[in-house]
Amino acid sequence: MKITPTLTGATIGFLAVIMQWLFGASGPQAYGICIACHTRDMLGWIVNTFTATSLIDVTRIGYSAPLLTVLGVLLGAHFSAIRHNEFVPKKREGGNIRMFILGFLVMISALIIAACPIRLLIRIAYGDLLAIFGAMWMIVGVIIGIMILRRFTSWG
Amino acid sequence: MGLTISIATLIVGFVIGYMGQRSGLCIIGGIRNFYLTRDTYLLKGVLAIIIVAGAGFIVTSLVGGPAQDFPAFSEGISEVGSLYNACKDPLNINNNTNNTNILSYIFLSLLGGLGLGIFSVLAIGCPFRQHVRTSEGDKGSFAYIIGFYLAALVFGFTIKPMITIIFGV
């Protein structure tokens, strides 16, 4: 069976509901899958555990156990890439520092809105008006970004 | 309980990572491709997340599952604010109840949404797609997720206290 984006999206939606059910009352609402928040919880758990403090604010569910979603994504995608001979180490010309800064800025934005693009969609499904509002501005941001790519940059 | 949660998130991540690598699903890419060429290949995945998750939440709330206060808007605007707060003040230290500073939430959603859109398009892919590309051996995406992880720690120390001071949320 061919794995299409539609099937992947449906699986993400289904698993988000299952994880929400598993988290139960101790998880925030619409928190089943999030790339940004789960990363923050995982790193916060590591820092808090090994320094025996609560330096980094994490969610209640992330406080009790590390959320390893992003580690799973890395392992799953790597397994798939190896299995289908699509693992090709490649470099983007002069792009590493730019990508580092962009990654930094995306995470800051994601934590300000409290959602990565995937959790934003899950929050919309949960009926969160702020998420609908935020997603509208995310679409505006995409259009602005495309204009910036066309006018001022050479890498698009 | 704790170990169950860790293993469950690891398995869920593995499954969506595997499928993400096969399908190339990207939220930002879906919106971008539709805007540029009216191509709906990736956009269908975006809509599938909303539709399936929405149907799932409706089912779990009907059978009395753990979907608390679903749908969020039925609880009024303050409850929507606390849904935002669940991630920002997660240990519920402030008890979240008298926090109805909705204009701050609206402004922060605007700011975060714009930032997500602009910077993700410039990086050519949403965070999920960058993780998948890192696993495919892309060194640029690897640099991206290093910055991504660093920002998660920096945010807690610097920007979150600033937001609390400025917006009082």
Image (cartoon, rainbow, N blue to C red):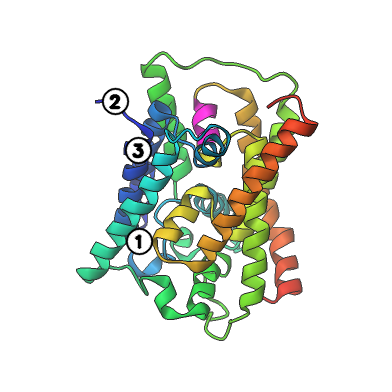
Residue A23 marker? 1
Residue A22 in view: no
Give SS at disc 1: helix
Residue A6 marker? 3
Q: Which residue appears at 37% of the width and 31% of the height?
A: B18
Residue B138, percent across and down? Answer: 58, 23
Q: Which residue appears at 47% of the width and 80% of the height?
A: B76
Query: How many numbered marks have been drawn onto this rendered protein structure?
Result: 3
Frontmost residue, B87 versus B58: B58
The residue that disc 2 covers is: A2
Query: Does residue B37 show up magenta in the picture?
Result: no
Please give the chain letter of the residue carrying mark 3: A
Mark toward the start of the polypeptide (2 vs 1): 2
Residue B57 marker? none
Give SS at disc 3: helix
Q: Can you name the residue that lies furthest to the bottom here?
A: B98
Residue range in magenta is B129-135
Please give the chain letter of the residue carrying mark 2: A
Amino acid on which disc 1 is placed: Phe
Q: Can you name the residue that lies furthest to the front here?
A: B38
Residue A59 vs B10, above or below: the answer is below
Mark toward the start of the polypeptide (1 vs 3): 3
Characterize the magenta stretch by its predominant secondary structure: helix
Give SS at disc 2: loop
Amino acid on which disc 3 is placed: Thr
Q: Which residue appears at 44% of the width and 74% of the height?
A: B73
Locate residue A96: give its quadrant.
top right
Query: Rounded to the nearest whole Å, what is the CA distance between mark 1 and mark 3?
Result: 26 Å
Query: Rounded to the nearest whole Å, what is the CA distance between mark 2 and mark 3?
Result: 11 Å
